[in-house]
Image (spheres, grey):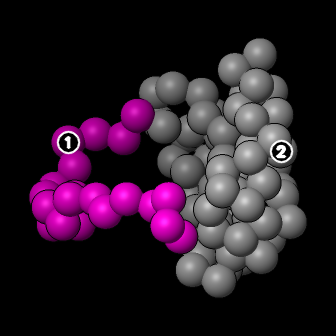
Amino acid sequence: MSKLKAFSKASLYLPTIGAAYKAIPSNYLICEDDNAIPPFVQEEMVKAAQDAGADMKFERLKSSHSPFLSHPEETVDFLIRAVS
């Protein structure tokens, strides 16, 4: 947690002007041990994006909410697969 940084509170309240995932092929890493966003909610988010017409692929990782901290190598591998 010491490596996490704060983000702008405005990002929670300002309206969005578009959704890039609808126009750009996207990938999502479902974190199976996430206590902040349970896996079933993540699955619903992916399905909602796909139902909205997004080219959304996904993979699963037995990880908590921040896989880039707890599983950096697996996260890098996921990112490499996503851009390949």
Pick whichever, 18 or 12, lies toward us.
12
Q: Quadrant of the C terminus?
A: top right
Residue 39 x/y as whole percent? 72, 74
What is the magenta range? Answer: 1-20
Q: Which residue is mark 2?
A: 74
> Which image quadrant for residue 43?
bottom right
Mark 1 is surrounded, within 10 Å at the Cα level, by few (under 14), some (14 to 19) or many (20 or more) other residues, namely: few
Pick whichever, 11 or 19, lies toward us.
11
- Judge left or right: residue 32 versus residue 26: right
Residue 16 x/y as whole percent? 22, 49
Pick whichever, 34 or 76, lies toward us.
76
Q: Which residue is mark 1?
A: 17
Residue 60 x/y as whole percent? 83, 56
Which mark is on residue 80? none
The answer to whether residue 30 of the structure is visible from this angle is: no
Q: Is residue 76 magenta?
A: no
- Identified at 28% across, 59% down, the residue is 7
The answer to whether residue 27 of the structure is visible from this angle is: yes
Q: Nearer the viewer, mark 2 or mark 1?
A: 2
Q: Using the image, determine if residue 74 lies above or below residue 64.
A: above
